[in-house]
Amino acid sequence: MITILPFYRDIIDYDKEPIWVHKLKGFNYHLMLSQLYDTYARISLDEHTLPMKDVKFLVNTDEKTKFNTKFERVDKWTDDDGNKHEKVIKRTFRNNVNDLPLIESKVVSETNAVDKIKGKLILCGVDHLIRRDVHRLFEIEPDFDIAVAVRQRKKVNNTIVLINDRKPDRHAVIYDFKGIERKRHIQKGFHNLFGNTEIQSYFL
């Protein structure tokens, strides 16, 4: 199973965001997300080959962002015997990151996804289109854990990250807290791992 997991969330308070995020106001990310999903649907639901029948599409988001009811919906129907049925069409992976700035919420949400969603993952933004069967991405070099795109053989482009099937004995070995804002949460991370154990002051 492969899960395509683009990250998107509504920004409610731009005052919490760095200035470069303000420049994103003019982009129609709902349209981009629709175009990404449409390319996924066209390829995965091809009536002749069904090349991506085992590929799932979920939007990685927070708990408040809303989507069109055609995308995330509950189908209800009554059968011939009068029995009522309900089927939830789940197309989001929601995270409690409402109070975090955009980039920090992306990092936390994608970490949660790697931790909780089984199988292979394609982590990306919404500003992508799918051209071919995504299985090809995992066939280039099948023996890897994480793959990150490199632009022009120099610069890391982490807008698309591939997560291969995780091996239980390698799960979450080291957590990295980068950036000033994320470093503020390192004690919270410690307590999440070890409970309310007292932190020994070896170096103070």
Image (cartoon, helix red, strand yellow):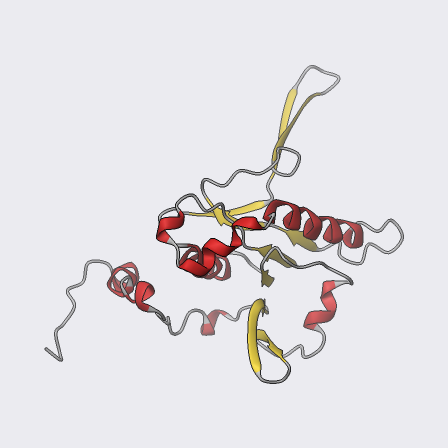
Residue 201 location in percent, x, y?
12, 74
- Give the quadrant of the N terminus: bottom right
Q: Residue at x 15, y 64 (%)?
A: 198
162, 144: nearer the viewer: 162
Above or below, comparing residue 122 to residue 42 in the picture: below
25, 149: nearer the viewer: 25
Residue 180 location in percent, x, y?
31, 67
Q: Quadrant of residue 89?
A: top right
- Give the quadrant of the C terminus: bottom left
Does the rendering let one see residue 97? no
Above or below, comparing residue 145 to residue 1 in the picture: below
| Numbered disc total | 0
Residue 4 location in percent, x, y?
63, 57
103, 168: nearer the viewer: 103
Q: Residue at x 79, y 55 (%)?
A: 43
Q: Quadrant of residue 150?
A: bottom right
For this view, does 139 lie left or right of residue 186? Answer: right
Residue 203 location in percent, x, y?
13, 80
Q: Residue at x 27, y 63 (%)?
A: 184
Q: Residue at x 75, y 49 (%)?
A: 41
Above or below, comparing residue 144 to residue 78 in the picture: below
Does the rendering let one see residue 139? yes
List the single residue furthest toward the top: 82
